[in-house]
Structures are given as C-alpha cells and as structure tokens.
Image (cartoon, rainbow, N blue to C red):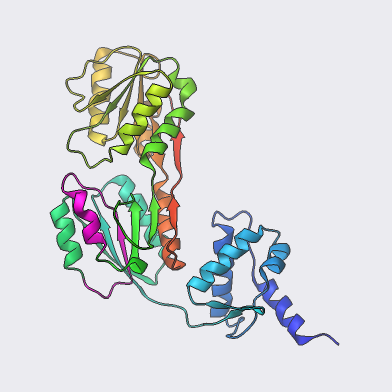
Amino acid sequence: QINPNIMKKLGMIDLISVDEYSITPKYLQIVNSVKREIESGNIQKGEKMPSINELSIELDIARDTVERGYKCLKNSGIIEAVPRRGYFIKNIEFLQTLKIFLLFNKLSSHKKTIYDSFAESLGENALIDFYIYNNDFLLFKRLLLNRKDDYTHYVIIPHFIEGGANAHEIINTIPKEKLLLLDKLVPGLTGEFAAAYENFEWDIYNGLNEAIDQLAKYHTLKIIFPENSYYPPEILKGFKNFCQDHTFSYKVISDIVEEPINVGEVYINVMEVDLVTLIERIMLLDFKIGEQVGIISYNETPLKKVILNGITTISTDFHQMGFIAAQLILCNSREQVKVPFKLTLRPSL
C-alpha cells in the first residue's frame, strides 16, 4: 500500500519545474511555478513542500538555487518553515496590488529601458506613480516629503547636480522595508533596504581593463566630465586608477569644445551631447576614428550600435537593472544586488 503522504510529495515535485533555456533565473522559475499552481488550484494551503535537497536532485540544479527560491516564497508569505518538519504552504491568497512611488532623476533612453523592464517584470498587478525631479535636490525633497503614505514601495534613483549631501536624511524618512534604491547607493542610510546598484569606481576600471588590447595603440586617455554634473565622482577615481596602473597619460576635460584633439588619444564621454560634439570635431580634423583617435561612450543605447559603424560602450545592463528591481519587490527582499556592467567593443576603438 502506497503512503498517501508520499503521493502528495511526489505530486508537488512534479508541479515545480524549471526551463534551462529560459533567461528567467531558476530560483524565480521555482517561485513562479509555485504561484502558478496555487492560482490553478493544484496546490492547497497546508500542503508540504519538497525538501530543498529533494527538489535540488529532482530538478538537477544547485541546492543554493532552491534555497533562494524558498527564501523568496517565505519572504512573500506563501510558505513557512516549521522546525524539524520542513516547508509548508502558508498562504494561497497572496496576490497583492503593489502601489509604487517611482522617482527618477531624469528622462533618457536608458532610463526608459529601466522603466520598461521594471514595469513589464512587475506585471499587471502593479500601480506605478512615476515622478521626475531633474537632478534638483529641492524638488526631490519636496516630492518625497509630500508623498502619500499608502505606497507599498518607494523606488528611487538618487543623482543630484548639487545639494545631495543631505539626501540620506530625506531618504531615511522612508520605512526601509518599502525602500529600493536604483543605480546608486547613498552613504548615511540606516537599516536594511533593497538596492539594484552600480559600483561606479570598479565598473569603469574593469570596463577599460577589458579593452586593454585595443587601448594599447593609444598613448593618452581623456574623459569628458562636465563640471557641476550629477555623474558620481567615483567614475573619475576609477578612470584615474586605471590610467595610473597601466601607465597611460590621462586628462579630465570639462568642455570638449575647446580641447585640442590629437592622434593617439582616446576620448571617453559620459554625456550624450558631448559625443555629438566630439564626433563632429574629429571628422573636421579628418582623423580616422578607431585608428588615429578612439572613442568610448558611457551608457549603451541602440543608436550607438550604428553611429560610425558602431561606438564602443561601457555600460550597465539597464534592462537587467529594471528586472532585478522588480524581482526584489516581488520577493519582498532587502537584498542589495550589483547590476552587471560590461564593455561592448565596436570599431570606434
């Protein structure tokens, strides 16, 4: 005679699946499987989940992956851990309307990529109130201090041209379980909160390091970094450290309009408007881009794939940033995740 508990456990294992060809992380596929089967009525409240080891073996995936999926389900209140007995379905009425206060510093093509990925990943069960503060700290402060209190989450990109030294005081007024920082961590924040962030100093260092073979034919690196910019100074620190470690001459330029352009130099722009000016000036000098003069542009955009047969970029994966942020919210997680950053080599270098 077959033990009905074994039948129940085998049935649960059969309902949870992962697709190795899917770009969705496997731990999230486990979460989504459980949610889907609950919604379909195939998993009921009080049922026992397979153990982490059992599911790891059944799905042929790492134990840590299953553990992460279970942690997400636990944080969402869907399962609970009972000491010495295992995991059980705690709640099958888990759908909650998310009300999100989304605060971006500006609009741009890559900010649109973040927004689209974020909204798509959250799905139809999220209501998003979207605000822009144009890198203005006073407007940022006013928007946050006048906020409603019925939001489930506050998602913030904290970049300021000036006045941002006190940003942590304003952000600290938000309950940390509702806070998610995007793009940049802010010193001075207290408590545990979620983040999908860049490490600006190490990202530019490592991005340039990946291009070391292409950079070898040049002698000088120049970064166009306007004064009174909202871009983090950590970018300059990483740039200078790379140049010093690899014995490149280097210079920080605030205005590309007046800067002499010479053969053997590589130009790194952080602002899109400077890229246009730079290309115009190089073309007037009739220098061959990618041979006599190199260009690296910060932040990947679709247009940079086609300009001059392709502009080399160093960039955060903005689609992934939006996706990670959404998953942190869906899993009710306070994890801080570094977003992938990569070099894309094209003929401009």
If the image is split into quadrants, where does the N terminus sit?
A: bottom right
| Left or right of 84 on screen, residue 274 | left
Q: Quadrant of residue 182?
A: bottom left
Residue 187 located left or right of residue 83: left
Residue interval drawn in magenta: 148-172
Q: Quadrant of residue 323?
A: bottom left
Residue drawn at 32 percent across, 36 percent down: 235
Residue 83 visible here = yes
Which residue is pictured at 40% across the width and 29% down the height? Answer: 310
- The residue lying toward the viewer, choosing from 218 and 300, is 218
Q: Position of residue 165 (x, y in %)?
A: 20, 49
Question: Which of these two is toward me, 283 or 140?
Answer: 140
Count of numbered circles in the view: 0
Q: Is residue 296 visible?
A: no
Residue 202: image location, x then y, percent: 41, 37
Residue 153 among magenta residues: yes
**Residue 107 pos. (x, y %):** 25, 49
Outermost residue on the right side: it is 1
Residue at 20 percent of width and 39 percent of height: 229
Residue at (41, 61) in percent of width and height: 326
Residue 164: percent from left, percent from top? 20, 49
Q: Is residue 48 above or below residue 205?
A: below
- Work out whether 208 lies above or below 86: above
